[in-house]
Every structure is written in C-alpha cells, then in structure tokens.
Amino acid sequence: MWLKDRRKRESDDLPLRVLEVEFTTWTLGLESPPERPLWTIRVGSVPSQLRQWTRACLISEALPRVRRWLLQSFPDTALEATPQCRVHLQAEQKRLLWEERSSKFVDARVEELPCGEVQRGV
C-alpha cells in the first residue's frame, strides 16, 4: 500500500515530457559517425483530456521556439556536450514548461510557456 501511494505522489509531482530535442554524436551498430549534426526529436504522450490544449500550445508556442533553438549556431564544443531542449506538461496546473540547456554540464534553464490563452476552457 505504501509503495503504491509513494509512486502516485511522485508521478503527480513530476511533469510529463511532451517533446525532447537533442544533439547526439552516437550511431547505431556498425554505422560510421555522422558527418553533420545529428538531431533527435522524441514526442511523448499526454492525457487525453489535455491533448487538444497541448497540441494547440505546442503549435503556437513550443514548435516556433524549438525551430529558433535548432537554427541558432552552436559551437563545436557545445555540440560535443549534447545540447538539448524539452517541453514538459504539468497536467495538474495545465502548464507547459520550456527547458533548455546548452550542455549536459550546465543546469537547465526552465520557464513557463505563455499558453494560458490558448483555447481557454478546453
């Protein structure tokens, strides 16, 4: 019983990862290393009751920001340090958070995306 309660409490406190973009230098199997930057994009799932609101907010706020982040110039040393950005959903508060880090060696910068007016009431 206690373990179940602890898991629920922890999952309620943690935001859901909706979108993650990162640079990686590794390849699968016997492939040779990439000649150009290799960016990976992962998309997570969201609760069905928040799907429409999350999608609208991703399109209006998060994806343009991801695009700007990808188009910025990264020094070669930064690319070796695995820069990444993420979008998290705090379902209880109905908020999307933007997280970015220029390197795995620095703390992430986190801020709330201005999604409050996107499809209010959904």
Image (cartoon, grey):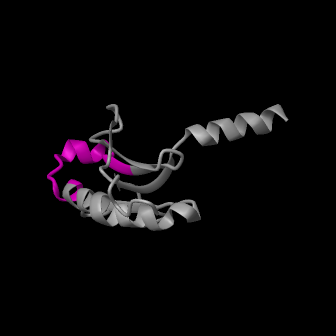
Q: Eyeballing the image, is 49 above or below 83? A: below
Q: Is residue 37 visible?
A: no
Of residue 75 and residue 116, the one placed in the foreground of this image is 116
Which quadrant of the structure image shows residue 117?
A: bottom left
Which quadrant of the structure image shows residue 11?
A: top right
Of residue 101 and residue 4, the one placed in the foreground of this image is 4
The quarter of the rendered structure image containing the N terminus is: top right
* Residue beneath the point at 17% across and 59% down: 71
**Residue 23 appears left or right of 1:** left
The part of the chain drawn in magenta is 69-86
**Residue 35 appears left or right of 122:** left
**Residue 110 picture location, percent across and down:** 34, 38
* Residue beneath the point at 33% across and 48% down: 84
**Residue 96 picture location, percent across and down:** 40, 50
**Residue 105 picture location, percent across and down:** 34, 32
Magenta-drawn stretch contains 80: yes
Q: Is residue 63 visible?
A: yes
Of residue 92 and residue 62, the one placed in the foreground of this image is 92
**Residue 87 appears left or right of 14:** left
